[in-house]
């Protein structure tokens, strides 16, 4: 055996061995997709108007603060639509301050005076930017939460370019309601000063708080409720607090959060703060010892403990939580708050029995296709068909090995891609074998016919597989869910087919021709 055959043989052995090691046992190495394993399919809508309103409120606060620093007190703002707000209390003779303040702080708003008020409109290009950012951030946040939940091979992506809808497929999930709550939970965390009751405790109704302030709550305050629960977690009623609107710190200042147990073995969330957040929190708590600090989650008070000392970079979130609730809350806090609300448009559950039916039907189609191809190759190409069968077997080892190595999920359309790969795998052999036949009919020797057959068929093989590969790449980039699963399997199959048909098949022919003595006949 010459050196050329030796190194080519070693390459084949190394590649096939590596893929076999990666792929087997198949039951453990290949992840099954939603349609095969069962799970849930969700279609979500990101309410991007929420993100626009939140940005508008942030800009309102910034304008009011800047005006106050320039000596203009008593201004207030209200959001009328997601892209427009009204500023009240600004005297007309102070309008000259606005251009500079807007340019330095909120340059993406246009404004006009309407009577006693000033109307602000957000620029259209900025509206589109905020919507896109909200969708991208929601996609990343949901992906982080699902990863924390431990779902294997989830599908989380936009439903087409420019859409505000997200497709979420979670194989193997047996508690869809918990996952839905985990995904949808905004989990906007705030630490805010409770100004009434001043010495701790809570009011039993809203009117008690309103009476304390003469029937009208100051603009810098708002009323928030806390659920009162029994030992089984059932809501018995609510109590109320008057809180400062401006938070001390928010969930954005958290560095990490994890589930734990409190002093009395109750479920709690332990958190730590970023360096900047810790500095703010330490200074603030040091200046407000003895006053109640409300921990507010999604607008609802979870607890309002009295500040007993200076708090720096860590703390505890207590509430009427179960162990599962604190684990989910810690997960949500670690992944960050959603930038906008989520609306569920569609939910579809796929049971394991339906998934097993899909596996059985796909397997039958797969085996039926292989048997027909084997029979066709042996009948048409005789002993040379065995060469094609060896290449086909190695092809599947390579495909499953690559899928297992990259952790790709096998779906029902993926099985369809495998079945198509059967045809693609022998297609290159058909082109080569027909070329060899022609050369033999023209009086070439077996060795010359084999060399010429592989050489002349190469351009056709490359053309056929390259065009299919380009189409598959487009499906991967622009397709969703099932389409992408088909395209991934097809892409791997095409690359494996080219390797086995051209490299492995040629090696087998060359091994045959390298035997001592001249080969006079070829069974083809």
Image (cartoon, grey):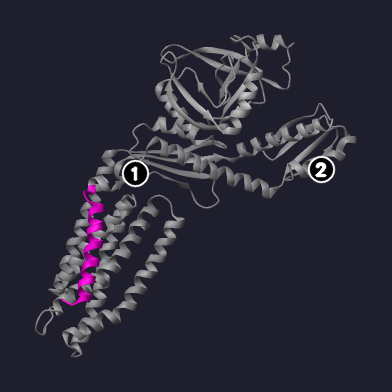
- Looking at this rendering, what residue extends furthest in the left direction? 517
Q: Secondary structure at mark 1?
A: helix
Residue positioned 29% across, 64% down in the render: 496
- Give x and y (percent) for residue 200: 60, 10
188 lies left or right of 101: left
Q: Is residue 354 above or below residue 236?
A: below
Res 34 label: 1
Which quadrant holds the C terminus?
A: bottom left
> Magenta stretch: residue 11 in it?
yes
Q: Secondary structure at mark 2?
A: helix
Which quadrant holds the N terminus?
A: bottom left
Residue positioned 29% across, 79% down in the render: 457
Q: Nearer the viewer, residue 231 or 478?
A: 231
Disc 1/disc 2 C-alpha distance (Å) = 55 Å
> Quick check: marks 1 and 2 in contact, CB under 8 Å?
no
- Give x and y (percent) for residue 184: 49, 33
The answer to which image quadrant residue 254 occupies is top right
27 lies left or right of 512: right
Q: Is residue 227 above or below residue 393?
A: above
> Magenta stretch: residue 174 in it?
no
The magenta-colored residue range is 1-26
Res 100 label: 2
Q: Is residue 1 above or below residue 306?
A: below
Q: Nearer the viewer, residue 369 or 487?
A: 487
Q: Nearer the viewer, residue 36 or 347?
A: 36
> Secondary structure of the magenta portion, mostly?
helix
Residue positioned 60% across, 44% down in the render: 131
Q: Is residue 297 above or below residue 159?
A: above
35 lies left or right of 2: right
Residue positioned 26% across, 71% down in the render: 503
């Amino acid at each position: 055996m010459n050196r050329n055959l030796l190194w080519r043989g070693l390459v084949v052995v190394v590649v096939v061995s590596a893929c076999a090691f990666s792929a087997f046992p198949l039951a453990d190495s290949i992840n099954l997709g939603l349609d095969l394993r069962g799970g849930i399919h969700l279609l979500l809508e990101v309410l991007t108007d929420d993100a626009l309103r939140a940005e508008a409120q942030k800009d309102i606060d910034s304008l009011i603060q800047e005006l106050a620093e320039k000596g203009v007190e008593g201004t207030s703002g209200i959001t009328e639509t997601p892209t427009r707000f009204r500023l009240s209390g600004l005297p007309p003779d102070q309008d000259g301050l606005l251009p500079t303040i807007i340019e330095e702080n909120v340059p993406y708003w246009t404004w006009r005076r309407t009577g006693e008020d000033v109307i602000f409109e957000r620029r259209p290009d900025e509206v589109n930017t905020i919507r896109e950012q909200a969708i991208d951030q929601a996609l990343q946040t949901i992906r982080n939460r699902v990863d924390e939940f431990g779902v294997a091979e989830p599908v989380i992506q936009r439903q087409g370019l420019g859409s505000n809808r997200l497709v979420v497929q979670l194989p193997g999930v047996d508690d869809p309601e918990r996952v839905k709550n985990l995904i949808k939970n905004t989990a906007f965390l705030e630490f805010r000063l409770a100004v009434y009751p001043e010495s701790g405790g809570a009011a039993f109704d809203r009117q008690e708080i309103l009476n304390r302030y003469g029937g009208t709550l100051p603009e810098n305050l708002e009323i928030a409720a806390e659920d009162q629960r029994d030992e089984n977690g059932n809501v018995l009623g609510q109590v109320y607090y008057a809180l400062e609107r401006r938070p001390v710190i928010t969930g954005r200042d958290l560095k990490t959060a994890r589930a734990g147990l409190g002093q009395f073995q109750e479920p709690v969330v332990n958190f730590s703060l970023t360096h900047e957040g810790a500095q703010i929190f330490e200074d603030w708590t040091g200046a407000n010892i003895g006053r109640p600090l409300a921990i507010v989650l999604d607008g609802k008070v979870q607890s309002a403990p009295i500040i007993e000392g200076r708090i720096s970079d860590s703390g505890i979130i207590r509430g009427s939580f179960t162990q599962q609730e604190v684990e989910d809350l810690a997960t949500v806090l670690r992944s960050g708050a959603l930038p906008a609300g989520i609306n569920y448009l569609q939910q579809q559950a796929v049971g394991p029995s339906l998934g097993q039916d899909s596996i059985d039907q796909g397997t039958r189609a797969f085996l039926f296709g292989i048997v027909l191809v084997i029979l066709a190759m042996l009948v048409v190409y005789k002993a040379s068909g065995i060469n094609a069968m060896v290449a086909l077997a190695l092809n599947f080892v390579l495909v499953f090995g690559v899928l297992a190595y990259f952790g790709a999920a096998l779906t029902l359309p993926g099985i369809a891609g495998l079945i198509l790969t059967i045809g693609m795998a022998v297609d290159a052999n058909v082109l080569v074998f027909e070329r060899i036949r022609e050369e033999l009919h023209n009086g070439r020797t077996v060795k010359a016919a084999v060399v010429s057959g592989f050489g002349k068929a190469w351009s056709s093989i490359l053309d056929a597989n390259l065009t299919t590969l380009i189409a598959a790449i487009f499906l991967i980039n622009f397709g969703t869910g099932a389409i992408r699963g088909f395209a991934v399997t097809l892409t791997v199959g095409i690359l494996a087919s080219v390797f086995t048909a051209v490299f492995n098949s040629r090696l087998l022919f060359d091994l045959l021709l390298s035997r001592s003595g001249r080969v006079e006949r070829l069974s083809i």
